[in-house]
Amino acid sequence: MFKGADLLEVVTLGKKPPNCDITLQIEATYASDGVARGVWKVDEKFLNGIGVTMGGFVASAADIIMAYAVSSKLNSNQSFASIDLHTTFHRPVLPGEVTIEAKVERMGTKTAYLVAELFQNGKKVSSVVSSVIILS
């Protein structure tokens, strides 16, 4: 299991990311002080029957980058797990590159609240909010 510090080493030291990052073709490019950024390479395998990216993949992409954001606020003995995830779709995600930015909006001792925004071709395609439990 990845702890907070392990995830940060993916960004800072180039360590191998979790399998979910590899499967979804997401690269975390930045994670510090509650903010994380990443790039998602969307191709045909993520498309649904009407030719747009399946919403569950969009939510998963945001969840992955939010994990890096919350990890950047934890100490080496802490980890986390998602409690809730809400996704709003503003426009379809098509094959190509999607940039993701996530931030910790609020953090207590047991719970953190995060937001993420996904952009494609300069336009916001989705907004995601999440709450996570902090595990010690």
Image: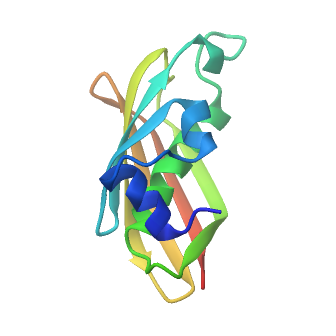
Work out whether 108 lies above or below 66: below
Question: Which of the image's four quarters has the C terminus?
Answer: bottom right
Q: Position of residue 109 (x, y in %)?
A: 51, 89
Q: Position of residue 38 (x, y in %)?
A: 37, 41
Question: Which of the image's four quarters has the N terminus?
Answer: bottom right
Work out whether 72 lies above or below 119: below
Q: Residue at x 67, y 36 (%)?
A: 56
* Left or right for 55, reference 120: right
Q: Residue at x 49, y 45 (%)?
A: 16
Q: Locate residue 105: give its quadrant.
A: bottom left
View extreme (bottom): residue: 109
* Left or right for 50, reference 75: right
Closer-to-camera residue (90/98): 98
The number of numbered badges drawn on the structure is 0
- Image coloring type: rainbow
Q: Locate residue 79: give its quadrant.
A: bottom right
Q: Residue at x 51, y 22 (%)?
A: 92
Q: Residue at x 55, y 68 (%)?
A: 3
* Left or right for 131, reference 84: left
Work out whether 133 lies above or below 66: below
Q: Position of residue 65 (x, y in %)?
A: 46, 50
Q: Position of residue 98 (x, y in %)?
A: 40, 29
